[in-house]
Amino acid sequence: MAKRTYAYLPATLAAVETLGVQVAIARRQLGWTVAELAGRLGVSTAVVGRIEKGAPGTAVGTVLEAAVLCGVPLFGADARDLPDLAARQRATLALLPERVRPKPAEIDDDF
């Protein structure tokens, strides 16, 4: 079966590339080689290369783990603040309806 391709939005590509560059900068500032970061992540050096180049197909968990390991702030928060941020977001989500249903089509009977 052929692999399906997906056309990402320009903003998505820019965000992934920005995060990848931030990881690359932080890794170099820490004095880590690509191989050292790969070892800490438990992935190959090729995966680290894809992260730093901003490849959108890289697993999001791996990209975020690389960012946290390198000290890149996520969502404008320090790594220590992320659990509180997640808890606040879960509280907000709990206030919203569990299911979102499509709005009924409005009948235009004005002839």
Image (cartoon, rainbow, N blue to C red):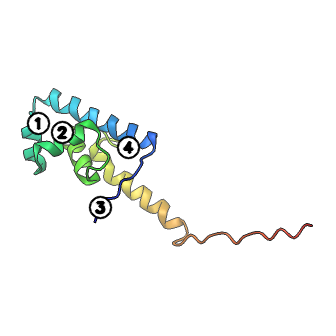
Q: Are marks 2 and 1 in contact (CB under 8 Å)?
A: yes
Secondary structure at badge 2 equals helix
Counting residues from the N terminus, which is met first, the one under dot 2 or under dot 4? 2
Distance Cα–Cα, label 4 vs label 1? 24 Å
Asked if residue 78 is positioned above or below residue 93 in the image, the reply reads: above
Would residue 110 be found to the left or right of residue 91 on screen?
right
Distance Cα–Cα, label 2 vs label 3? 25 Å
Asked if residue 29 is positioned above or below residue 36 in the image, the reply reads: above
Counting residues from the N terminus, which is met first, the one under dot 4 or under dot 1? 1
Counting residues from the N terminus, which is met first, the one under dot 1 or under dot 3? 3
The extreme right residue here reads 111
The residue that label 2 is drawn on is 49
Counting residues from the N terminus, which is met first, the one under dot 2 or under dot 1? 1
Instruction: Look at the image and tell me in which quarter the C terminus lies.
Output: bottom right
Between 60 and 98, the residue placed more toward the observer is: 60
Distance Cα–Cα, label 2 vs label 4? 23 Å
Between 92 and 56, the residue placed more toward the observer is: 56
Q: Are marks 2 and 4 in contact (CB under 8 Å)?
A: no
* Label disc, if present, on residue 75 of the rendered structure: 4
Q: Position of residue 86 (x, y in %)?
A: 37, 55
Q: Position of residue 17 (x, y in %)?
A: 33, 36
What amino acid type is highlighted by mark number 1?
A: Val
Distance Cα–Cα, label 3 vs label 4? 35 Å
Q: Are marks 4 and 1 in contact (CB under 8 Å)?
A: no
Residue under the image location 25 percent in, 36 percent down: 53
The residue that label 3 is drawn on is 2
Residue 76 appears in view = no
Secondary structure at badge 4 equals loop
Q: Quadrant of residue 76?
A: top left
The residue that label 1 is drawn on is 34
Q: Are marks 2 and 3 in contact (CB under 8 Å)?
A: no
What amino acid type is highlighted by mark number 3?
A: Ala
